[in-house]
Amino acid sequence: MQGGQRSIAVLAALMAIALTLAVLHNSGATVPVEGVLVRVTSPIRDAFSGAAARVAGLFEDLGRLNTLRDDNLALLRRVQELETKIAALGNTERENASLREALAYVQAHQELDLVTARVVGRDSVGMLNTLVIDRGASAGVRVGMAVVAQGGLVGRVTGVSDASADVLPLLDAASSVNVVAGGQRASADGIADGDGKGKLVMHRIEPTAALAIGDPVVTSGLGGVVPQGIPVGRIVSLESSPASVFRQAQLAPFVAADNVEVVQVVLGQRAST
């Protein structure tokens, strides 16, 4: 009973205080007290307001950073798209230039039966590094045929399927072709071999052959498979060896197989009319 009576008394006292404060507020008597409370609590209120503003600013900054990140990603994707288009245009232009060269070669060599092919890959077959072209047996391509591009010898066909063929580049260590040097004088027969390191060497040159630096070297036609007169390279140096009666010459090839995209396979020579 005593606990209940105390609770009732406290409640009554609180109600009395609330009523008194209400009366005093309405009469203006509490204004000085309220001013003191405002001054006392103002720093706290300002501190909370400043903290709230900083938090709001932080969220705004985070929002701007997310927007900038999205914009940067969009710009990066656009740059990548443009780079892809530029690369495709460059490839198309190079292929068009190669096709124009191929057409010019065909028109300039009416005596040759040629089929144009694209290089569609590069492959390693055993110890050989070959080019893969998109013409094969169905187009008349056979093993041993000469392959030309940009007006010079690229290599020879070493393998054929119905729709594709493998071409052994002239500079490969396993490559060999009969050639003649000396320009119009055509004074020296020999064999041009690749060394697999980007060099081409003409062997078995007669010691008395009249040759000079810069002389062109072309296919000789010996063997009957590779036609005569296809440009191979130019002489850049002449060498003699005490161990051999023959000389040899370093050649600069006319065509670099690594840069070839369109080629012509020499199917044979047309009968003269």
Image: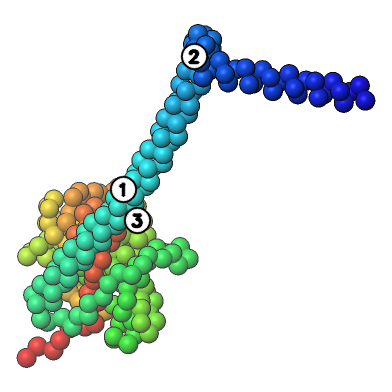
Amino acid type of disc 1? Leu
Give SS at disc 3.
Answer: loop
Which residue is farthest bottom?
Answer: 273
> Could you give the CA–CA distance between mark 2 and mark 1, rounded to whole angstroms?
66 Å
Left or right: residue 153 compared with residue 80: left
Q: Which residue is mark 2?
A: 28
Q: Is residue 12 above or below residue 138?
A: above
Amino acid type of disc 3? Asp
Q: Nearer the viewer, mark 2 or mark 1?
A: 2
Q: From the viewer's side, name the closer residue of 57 and 43.
A: 43
Q: Earlier in the sequence, mark 2 or mark 1?
A: 2
> Could you give the CA–CA distance between mark 2 and mark 3, rounded to whole angstroms?
111 Å
**Residue at left 41%, top 39%?**
63
Q: Earlier in the sequence, mark 2 or mark 3?
A: 2
The image quarter containing residue 247 is: bottom left
Which mark is drawn over residue 75? 1
> Could you give the CA–CA distance between mark 3 and mark 1, rounded to whole angstroms?
48 Å
Which residue is farthest right?
Answer: 1
